[in-house]
Image (spheres, rainbow, N blue to C red):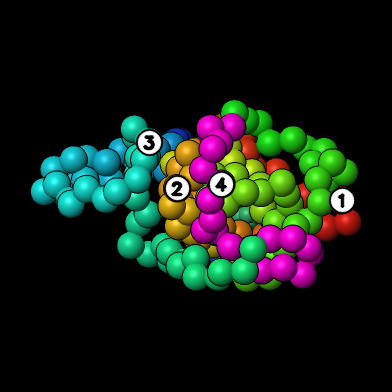
Amino acid sequence: MSSEREYVCPDCGCLLIHSNPLTLESMVDVHNQLCVVKRQKSMASQLATRASAPPKPVTTGTQRPGVTSATPSITTTAATTTTTAGSANTTISLSGTGTNYSKAEGPIDPEFKSKRQVVGTFQGIKVWGPIDPPGQLGIWGTQVTVDFDICIADGACIEACPVNVYEWLDTPGHPGSEKKTFMAREKDCIFCMACENVCPPQCVKIFQKGT
Ligand code: SF4
Ligand code: SF4
């Protein structure tokens, strides 16, 4: 008689089978974090909830149609640094006078590391220029990299990441979106590629260690 146990995802119908119940439980956890159908249902549910909620006060600055706000569990990092960019040891500022830029189109240049220079860091995360805050912010990260000038802040990468690498970073004055997904816990990345695969404008690029 077979000792195998199984789980059928109620959202996408995916069948998971394993003889060890603990292993199967782990498989179910990972599946639930990555299940696209489950995430789409969750997003639809959140949108429906927000649509029925009373309107919130309008904030200043540009707002892209369809861009949603962060969920309560996601940390928003305040951009409080003031030093201007200039070298790899410089702390990047998100404020400045560089507003004469329009939103860039994806995808991210996968060869950017051979074409750009590191112009500074923000909370230990590398920033690759050129930058001219707040209108041009460059590409951020080393293993988990995001082109901030392309990001539209829809939050798909945050929702897809199973290990909570990202958090929101306010970027007021940027023409693409006034917040970005900051890879604050880049070192926790397990290279599952989920964020790179779900990013609508393809502005995420994951580099395995040593690449
Ligand atoms: S590749 Fe890394 S950052 Fe992207 S979703 Fe997977 S664990 Fe998160
Ligand atoms: S999925 Fe792409 S566009 Fe959307 S928030 Fe993440 S990096 Fe930005």
Real-space CA distance between mark 3 and mark 2, rounded to the nearest whole angstrom: 12 Å
Q: Position of residue 65 (x, y in %)?
A: 34, 32
Can residue 28 be seen here?
A: no
Q: Is mark 2 within 8 Å of ligand 2?
A: no
Q: Is residue 209 left or right of residue 201?
A: right
Q: Earlier in the sequence, mark 4 or mark 3?
A: 3
User: Please, is residue 188 above or below residue 199 in the view?
Assistant: below
Identify the disc placed on residue 173.
2
Q: Decide: few, some or many residues near mark 1? Use Cα within 10 Å; few <14, some 14-19, many ≥20.
A: few
Identify the disc placed on residue 211.
1
Circles 2 and 4: CB distance less than 8 Å? no
Task: Single out the residue that lies furthest toward the left.
Answer: 54
Q: Which residue is mark 3?
A: 64
Q: Earlier in the sequence, mark 1 or mark 4?
A: 4
Q: Earlier in the sequence, mark 2 or mark 4?
A: 4
**Magenta stretch, residue numbers:** 85-104
Residue at x 18% of width, y 52% of height: 57
**Residue closer to the observer: 136 or 149:** 136
